[in-house]
Image (spheres, helix red, strand yellow):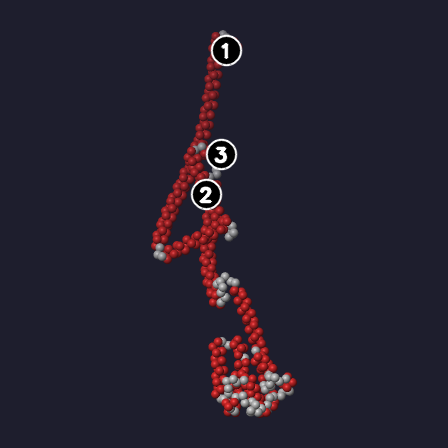
Amino acid sequence: MASDDHLDVEDDFGGDFAGGSASRRSGNKRSFADLDDDEDDIFGSKKVSFASAPALEVFLFVTFVVYCQIDVLKLFMSGPLMAKLLKQIELNMCNAEYLGFHKSLNFSFCWQYGSYKVNQKIEETAPGVATGMILSLRESLKNCQDELSRCQTKLEDAKSEIQKWHFAFQNESFIPQGATPEPKFVVNYLQTLRSSEESLREQLEKAKKKEAVFIVTFAKREQEIAELKSALRDLRTQLKPPSMQARRLLLDPAIHEEFTRLKNLVEEKDKKVKELQDNIAAVSFTPQSKMGKMLMAKCRTLQEENEEIGNQANEGKMHELAMKLASQKSQNTELRSQLEGICKQMEKLTGDVDRSNELVVILQEKLEAKEDEIQRLKNKLRGNAMGEEQNELDTDMNANDDNGLNPVEVQTEN
């Protein structure tokens, strides 16, 4: 800006713009008393004495300074405040015209005249005070220039930062094609991201709750599996008698049929245990595995079903669901009662089998006793038969003796 150059060079408040640096350092000032009225009569017939307006030089000087720094003020002032300042400058110019100045007032002359009046006031007071005032004004001017340079640096940094943000948001997907990245687009996108983050957080909380429910369910299933395993182990120990006794028991058709039924029941229990083990293996999954993907898909379907059930409940179908729940509860109670009856029947059959086994053992013992008795009787009969034969031989021998025959002859005859 041209006005800033003048401010930097002519900081002695009264030096000519075309003057050299030596004249400024020596403190030479332009004397308005030496100027002729005919040579400096730039206002013609409308020129009035400055003495008629003692405050004129002050507002002319201030107006000139504000006008010179108008480009800088535009950077730090809002639109309404800037318009108000320009209006005030225009009002000052109108006041100057009313006091006898022409509209085409030379601002360099205003600067010279204002600085002359200030210097004149300072010279009237005291030389030391004038020097101190000049030094303080120079220092304040330097401070203002430093502040201006800092503000300009901050402005450049802000512009570069804005440019960076502009380039950063220029190629984003939420910016419409061919449009510039306006702040409203960024704000809308951030609000959308915030709302999506909240919805995702809610979904995460729901997933955590469902995960806790699944964990409890799996723990219950593991407990049921452990109980079934222990029951199966007990059944195996009960259904595994000694080998000889098992062979003897299998000879009975009723026991064989019961054994076959229990064997089939054990196979069914083994299948159920295997299914439960597969379910447990499916619990410990990774999102990349096949079972994990299947479980995730199933979870999604369950979530959709839960949402549908929620919508149905909101639409007034809670009564129907309550009826279904009551029917399910009644069915569960019936099944539980049937299961209890089956368990009682199983206990009864188990008692009957035990009693049958005991009866078989008793009958086997009696059979062994009878076999022993039969063997004893057979031995006795054999002994009796041998005695009778001996008696017959004795009688034959006696008969031969009576007939006068020798025993040797009888034997040969025989």
Asked whether disc 2 touches disc 1, contact meaning CB atoms under 8 Å apart, the reply is no
Q: 407 or 79, which is in the foreground?
A: 79
Q: Which residue bears the numbered disc 2?
A: 269
Up-down relation of residue 30 to residue 198 (above or below): below
Mark 1 lies on a secondary structure that is: loop
First of labels 3, 1 by sequence position: 3
Q: Does residue 284 show up?
A: no
> Which class describes the residues within 10 Å of circle 3: few (<14), some (14-19), or many (20+)?
few
Please provide percent x and percent y for residue 27: 63, 87
The CA distance from mark 2 to mark 3 is 27 Å
First of labels 2, 3 by sequence position: 3
Report the amino acid beneath label 3: Met
Report the amino acid beneath label 1: Asn
Q: Which residue bears the numbered disc 3?
A: 244
Up-down relation of residue 369 to residue 102 (above or below): above
First of labels 2, 1 by sequence position: 2
Asked whether disc 2 touches disc 3, contact meaning CB atoms under 8 Å apart, the reply is no
> Which class describes the residues within 10 Å of circle 1: few (<14), some (14-19), or many (20+)?
few
Q: Which mark is residue 283?
A: none
Q: Which residue bears the numbered disc 1?
A: 414
Q: 369 or 286, which is in the foreground?
A: 286
**Residue at point 52% right, 64% down?**
170
Residue 355: image quadrant is top left
Please provide percent x and percent y for residue 387: 47, 18
Q: Nearer the viewer, mark 2 or mark 1?
A: 2
